Image: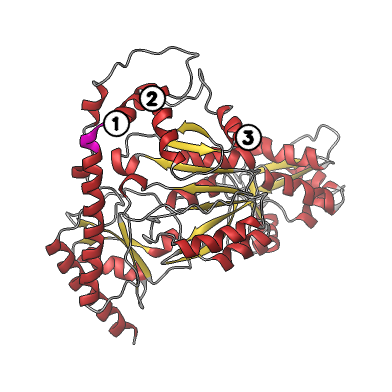
Amino acid sequence: MSKAAQLTERRGSHHTGAGKTIWARAGTTNDSSQELWHRTKMLESTPGGDHVQIKGTTAAEIAGSVRDQVASGGLAPRSALPPVRVLAAELGVNRNTVALAYRRLVEAGVAETRGRRGTVIAAVPQLAREGVGVAGGAVDLASGNPDPELLPDILAAAGVGHYHQLLYGVPAVDAGLAEWASADFTEDIEQPFRTLVAHGAVDATERLLKAHLARGDTVAIEDPCFLASIGTLRLNGYRSAPVPVDGSGMRPDALRAALEDGARAVVCTPRAHNPTGASLTGERVADLRAVLADHPQVLVIEDDHFSAVSARPYYRITPPTTARWALVRSVSKFLGPDLRLALIAADAETAVRLEARLSAGTTWVSHLLQHIVRELLLDPGVLELHERAREVYAHRSGLLVDRLHAHGIEVPYRPDGLNVWVELDVDGRSAVEALAQRGWAVRPGHLFGRDPSTHRGAIRVTSSTISEPQAEAFAAELAAVVAELRTAGS
């Protein structure tokens, strides 16, 4: 009698169907896949053990069996699957058949590979997010939020103009908003484009990637990177190719390497990069355009999230040879995060693919939101507020950089945006914990990397609401923390 049959008989189960059956234990461990499987074998006769059966003789049947067990709750997230060799022997099939089944499970997002630890059932990734709560009355330099005092009155704008109830079937984009957006984009884009509206920049980026890429494709992203971009890639099963960022933005040599290694898309922040505050220079853009010109098949997404209040000019990295591209400008930073709306300029084919996902009558962006955004963007008073916000944000980040410099902590460039990226020669997480004990909340740098082991000596400080006394006090406290950590580590 085969091992599989013995196991079935021992549990009083009856195998039916063409495929053989193997029982697997749901559980996790840090051991290698082979060690885990041997441990599972020893525990198979344990009373009350949770076991699931994998059966089939083809890759499709085996993968389907695993998916059935996941769907029914028999295999929980992070449960280990049998090693390929073991499962192949038990089912009496070729190893390549099991390997193909596992590959299909990984491609479908049902499982993920863990190197020596084998293949496990995928779990929903735990993602770091913006706007974290600050406990204990600490000064909030962590949230990444704009200053509420520099945002307009949304409710007042809702009552302006001639909004009326709209029904299914109307055009997906408000005509007045489309007219404003087209004029705005025309100043920066010299080639034909279509204008669309999405539910914010993160939604736009996710839809753009889905319109052109498949699960498992590689996307070149900035390193360090915007938290939501990291989350978008992980949740949708894309691979990431980190491209280091300096004070002038993405490094061209690293972008070229990522594209030559097979990246099929690039997501770039042209100015006010989050978390570093870096902005592209004209010289850097010329180098990046030259790199992208050699890869016209690559989808290029520019996330110009800070457009209306940025102190830096917009430089376009997309060369004329790029076939598929999009420029995304959300309104969250200068009209309000709760206005979930982003304007998109894209090539014709990309626009068609997006329209299929943002069509009238199904998933369009609320025309009430579009009405509010249009009225705000046309309001001279709001434009004056944007001018003030541009000056205030630049002043506050510059103030923090100056105070840090006065206390011996250098930031090598003037950032733009809501945050300042500070590289330290001590552990960033230890610095964050020590600052929290002193009443200051900031974010550790490792959260902003694809690999948590990177950027361990950095912190991100949100400067959007910082006052002059706070900047001085924080710089002094950070310098003291760094000195203490240096002493402790010596």
Percent coordinates x, y for residue 476 in the rendering: 18, 73
- Look at 84% across and 38% down and name the residue there: 19
Residue 479 in sight from this viewpoint: yes
Magenta stretch, residue numbers: 377-382
- The residue at which mark 2 appears reads as 176
Q: Amino acid at mark 3?
A: Glu
> Is residue 260 on the magenta stretch?
no
Numbered label tally: 3
Percent coordinates x, y for residue 66 in the rendering: 70, 41
Q: Amino acid at mark 2?
A: Gly
- Look at 37% across and 69% down and name the residue there: 458
Which of the marked residues, 3 or 2, is nearer the chain's N terminus?
Answer: 2
How crowded pointer 1 is (Cα within 10 Å; few <14, some 14-19, many 20+) is rated as few
**Pick the front one: 197 or 319:** 319
> Is residue 380 on the magenta stretch?
yes
Q: Amino acid at mark 1?
A: Leu
Residue 12 in sight from this viewpoint: no
**Pick the front one: 446 or 379:** 379
Q: How is the image coloured?
A: secondary structure
Residue sticking out furthest to the bottom: 490
Percent coordinates x, y for residue 354 in the rendering: 56, 32
Which of the marked residues, 1 or 3, is nearer the chain's N terminus?
Answer: 3
Q: The residue tagged with tag 3: helix, strand or loop?
A: helix
Which of the marked residues, 2 or 1, is nearer the chain's N terminus?
Answer: 2
- The residue at which mark 1 appears reads as 378
- The residue at which mark 3 appears reads as 349
Q: Are marks 2 and 1 in contact (CB under 8 Å)?
A: yes
Q: CA distance from mark 3 to mark 2?
A: 23 Å
How crowded pointer 3 is (Cα within 10 Å; few <14, some 14-19, many 20+) is rated as some
Q: Report the side of 142 relative to 167 (left or right).
A: left
- Look at 71% across and 41% down and name the residue there: 53
Q: Quadrant of residue 467?
A: bottom left
